[in-house]
Image: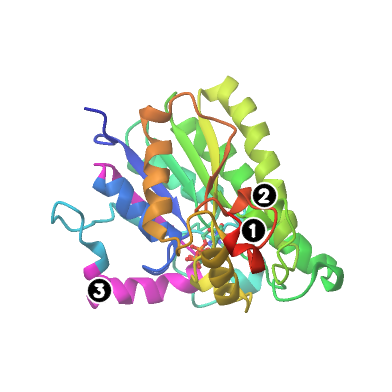
Amino acid sequence: MISVDLRGRRALVAGVADDVGFGFAIARALADAGAAVCLACWPPALGIFETLLRRGKLDASRRLSDGRELQFERIYPLDAAYDSMDDVPADVRDNRRYSGRGDFTISGLAQRMKEEFVPPQLDILVHCLANGPEVHKPLLETSRQGYLAAVSVSSYSLVSMVRNFAPLMPRGGSVLSLTYLAAERVIPGYGGGMSSAKAAMEADTRYLAFQAGRKYGLRINTISAGPVATRAASVTGVINEIVDYYAANAPLPEQLTTNEVASVAAFLASPLASAVTGTTLYVDKGFHAMGKALGDSKDHL
Ligand code: NAD
């Protein structure tokens, strides 16, 4: 019988701060398949997430398919805008949501995992974070600073994470990120350079797959997910319209769930996908295949 079996493996899911986003669903699916799961959470959101966990607000979402409760081996602070503490401006370092959290940069997190676990420290790395401070602005109106911030946090962070975490991972390890169709088609409302960040991420997935494949034997893939009204997506102000549009026009005319994306993530992380790398895999009810909205052609399937 073929099944996704991740027992004995450790995953790090970066970009979880509630139980609504893709990150939480992916963490749960990986745990369901037997992996030990660590999280990395953006310091400004970490306190709230810890409170939600402590107060039991996430208990229902933590139920695994066999009745076990999803446990997190570690919950680390991570601000993916920074590669090392030398990059962190004083006002961030001294901010009350950051201070006392230790080294919350990408290299700092890799170092912590290197010290806290025996090799290979990490089998599965999931990059599930994005931030575009001007995402509500059209690209044409986006400032240089806003554009570069979107690309820095949302895509360069993947390059940095692969560089920093690859030495902790065994051959056959899997790196996964999340992208969106706006990388290759125009999605009105998806602004601030986030479309450029996703295009970069898809190109980087191919280059990283080649280079980290040759050097470390890792697989690097990205899932192009359909729309879900998560916290990050809601900032665009158009997510509900996009969700409805997909549900009306996709080959499978129904709303996508985060669990449907998460089960593909678990497959990609598993040895079943040992030959899959450098790929952008659509998990979007087939919407990417369409070239025209249905409109009046509903009767002309
Ligand atoms: P989300 O809000 O649940 O996740 C985004 C996470 O990024 C949050 O936990 C946030 O705290 C974290 N984050 C923001 N800035 C950070 C930083 N500097 N350092 C570390 N973490 C930071 O939303 P989501 O939609 O689940 O997003 C997860 C991924 O899925 C993103 O890459 C997003 O672009 C992608 N995606 C989302 C959709 C959608 O419709 N929701 C569709 C396709 C792809």
**Residue 232 locus on image (x, y percent):** 55, 70
Quarter of the image holding residue 268?
A: top left
The residue located at (19%, 53%) in the rendering is 65
Chain-order first, disc 1 or disc 3: 3
Q: Residues within 10 Å of mark 3 (few under 14, many from 20)?
A: few
Quarter of the image holding residue 41?
A: bottom left
Observer-nearest of 247 and 61: 247
Three-letter amino acid code of the residue under disc 2? Tyr
Would you say the beta carbon of the disc 1 residue lies within 8 angstroms of ligand 1?
Answer: yes
**Residue 257 locus on image (x, y percent):** 41, 61
The reply to whether residue 98 is visible in this rendering is no
**What residue would you read off at disc 1?**
153
Circles 2, 1 touching at the beta carbon (< 8 Å): yes
User: Please, is residue 171 above or below residue 255 in the view?
Assistant: above
- What coloring was used for the rendering? rainbow
Using residue 39 as the reference point, say whether residue 296 is left or right of it.
right
Q: Is-magenta flag for residue 51?
A: yes
**What residue would you read off at disc 3?**
54
Mark 1: which secondary structure?
helix
Three-letter amino acid code of the residue under disc 3? Arg
**What residue would you read off at disc 2?**
156
Q: Residue furthest left?
A: 67
Mark 3: which secondary structure?
helix
The residue located at (66%, 47%) in the rendering is 201
**Residue 92 locus on image (x, y percent):** 61, 71
The C terminus, quarter of image: bottom right
Observer-nearest of 259 and 217: 259
Alpha-carbon distance for marks 1 and 3? 28 Å
Chain-order first, disc 2 or disc 3: 3
User: Please, is residue 59 above or below residue 3 in the view?
Assistant: below
Alpha-carbon distance for marks 2 and 3? 33 Å
Q: Which residues are magenta?
A: 33-60
